[in-house]
Structures are given as C-alpha cells and as structure tokens.
Amino acid sequence: MSTSHTALIVIDVQSSFRYEPYFTDRDLPDFLAAQNALIEGSIRLGIPVIRVLHSDGPETANNAFALASGHVSPLAGLTGFDAASTFIKHRHSALVGTGLDVWLTEHGIRRLIVSGIRTEQCCETTTRHASDLGWQVDYVTDATLTFDMTQPDGSPLTAAEIKARTATVLQDRFCTLCSVDEALSRAQAAA
C-alpha cells in the first residue's frame, strides 16, 4: 500500500546533540521508541521518510554540528532506513534553503508528519513554516525530543514543560497533534 501524498520528516535525529552540554539520556529511550515506531510504520505504509540533518557553525572537527566533526550522522538507536531523500539544513526550518519544499511539491506531498529533535526549535519552526506554505501537518509530540532549559529569569523550564507549551501553541493553528498511531492512521485515511 502506498500513502504517496504524505511524507514523514525526521528532523535532526543526529549524534551532534550528544556533544552538547545540555544533552541528557533521560527521555531518549521513550523518544527513540516513538520515533522508530513512526519510521517503521511509515515504511510499512509506503510513506516516504525524509531525513533532515543540521549543520552550522565553524566547519571544524571540534564543532559537533559541523560536517567535519563526523557527528552530523544518525543518532545511535535510531532505526536504520533508506531515506527517500536527505537534506542538510543550516537554519531552524527544514524548508529554508534545502530544496525540501521543491522535493515535496514535485512528489505531490500534501501532508507532512513532523518528528525529531528539538521539539520547540527545529520541529516547531518547520511545522509553522510548512503550515504557512499550505501543507497539512501532523505533529507527533512523542516522536520529538528536547532538553531542559533556563528561562530568562533564571528559573528552570523542564523538557516536559517545553513539550506541553509547544503542543499548546501549535495545536489547531499550525498542525494536528497526533500520537504515532494517529499520524499513521490519518496518513492511511488520506491516501
């Protein structure tokens, strides 16, 4: 079965994050379980899976987000998959300067399933951008990962709070929030 008008975008699920001071494994097992289930379900349904990786900063081996570091590669634990296409981005939105928008249009994609790292950064930004450009977006919160942050007043903001805030501001404005199973069911129904 092919669900050709939907594409799954796997954003920045890459080793680079392991080298950042904020990285923690705390939520990683649950994230990888959801992300891998989404990828595997998409493949079963014939949904193209797009890999997006992030590279920026100085192109030196000691910058984990530089291609020269060797860390702009799939995160350990991510299920292996043959990407329908791979894009390297240098901005928060996967649709800026990558050619992804052209690929999606050329392949008749009308619905996007968004997943990856970081919930409130590249995943949220891509979701907003895609919605503004006219794509229907299903945002799978469980298949996104983020990390604790410190607010401007110095108080902590947990990853769970960030995910809740992201879901709140995206829902019904820029996307439909979905579980893994809901996103796959919606893609199948739209086929």
Image (cartoon, grey):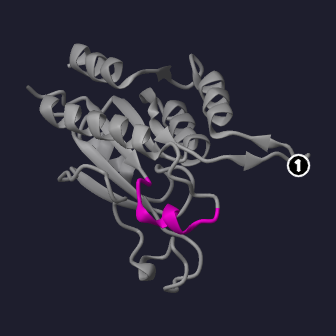
Q: What residue type is labelled 1?
A: Gly
Residue sitting at 22 percent across and 33 percent down?
42
Whole-percent x, y for residue 17 in the image: 51, 61
For residue 14: magenta?
yes
Q: Nearer the viewer, residue 130 or 73?
A: 73
Q: Which of 59 and 35 is in front in this view?
A: 35
Identify the element where label 1 is drawn: loop
Q: Which residue lies furthest to the front in this view?
A: 26
Q: Residue furthest top?
A: 189
Report the side of 64 relative to 181 (left or right).
Answer: right
Report the side of 85 relative to 53 (left or right).
Answer: left
Report the side of 101 relative to 44 (left or right).
Answer: right
Q: How many labels does the image show?
A: 1
Specify start and end residues of the magenta stretch as a single range.
12-21
Whole-percent x, y for residue 107 in the image: 23, 40
| Quadrant of the rendering where the N terminus is positioned | top left
Q: Is the residue 114 above or below the residue 84 in the image?
A: above
- How many other residues sit within 10 Å of disc 1, few (<14), some (14-19) or many (≥20)? few
Whole-percent x, y for residue 142 in the image: 45, 31
- Residue under label 1: 154
Q: Is the residue 156 above or below the residue 41 in the image?
A: below
For residue 139: magenta?
no
Whole-percent x, y for residue 166 in the image: 63, 31
| Quadrant of the rendering where the C terminus is positioned | top left
Q: Residue furthest left?
A: 1
Quarter-of-image position of residue 112: top left
Report the side of 167 relative to 109 (left or right).
Answer: right
Residue sitting at 60 percent across and 33 percent down?
163
Quarter-of-image position of residue 160: top right
